[in-house]
Image (spheres, rainbow, N blue to C red):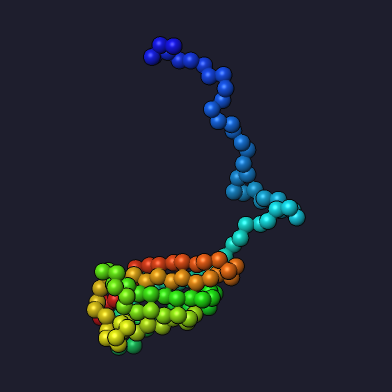
Amino acid sequence: VTPNSVESISTPIAEVVNTPTISETPIVNENQRAPKSSDVELILPNIFTPNDDGSNDILTINMTQLEDVSLVVLNMKGQVQFTFQGTEFMWDGRDKNGDLVPSGSYIYFITGKDNLGELYKKYTNLEVKY
């Protein structure tokens, strides 16, 4: 074999396997299990304005689709500003000492168990503006 020659390979490197496409429905019998599917869909607000003008003053998230829920709000330095455990989250923009957090960027994390008992984790950025 020379450096620029082409040599025929007698054994295949990979085998082509037929796999179902997305449009095909997999057959499930007593020996197979359907894949797990969580029904949890949370709407996570990414801005709120706790300035007592009567509009968007409280950040709320309905997490009743989850169990054993906890939520933590961090500033961009990674410092805990607020924590919550329960399913009906409401936050007025006050930190763990009762003071209003400064305007700026934050991030909040939610963890809990979904309807199948599986760990559910979600996070998003949050802008606090006055």
Q: Between 20 and 3, which is closer to the camera in this rendering?
A: 3
Residue 91 quadrant:
bottom left
Q: For the N terminus, give its image quadrant.
A: top left
Q: Between 18 and 31, which is closer to the camera in this rendering?
A: 31
Q: Between 43 and 11, which is closer to the camera in this rendering?
A: 11
In the image, residue 122 lies at what x, y percent? 44, 67
Answer whether residue 68 is visible to the viewer in this image. yes
Q: Between 18 and 87, which is closer to the camera in this rendering?
A: 87
In the image, residue 72 lies at what x, y percent? 38, 75
From what the image shows, is residue 120 above or below residue 88? above
Residue 56 quadrant:
bottom left
Answer whether residue 55 is visible to the viewer in this image. no
Indicate left or right for 40 with 77 as reference. Answer: right
Please give the count of numbered marks on the rendered protein: 0
At horizontal 62% and vertical 57% (from top left) the residue drawn is: 35
Q: For the C terminus, give its image quadrant.
A: bottom left
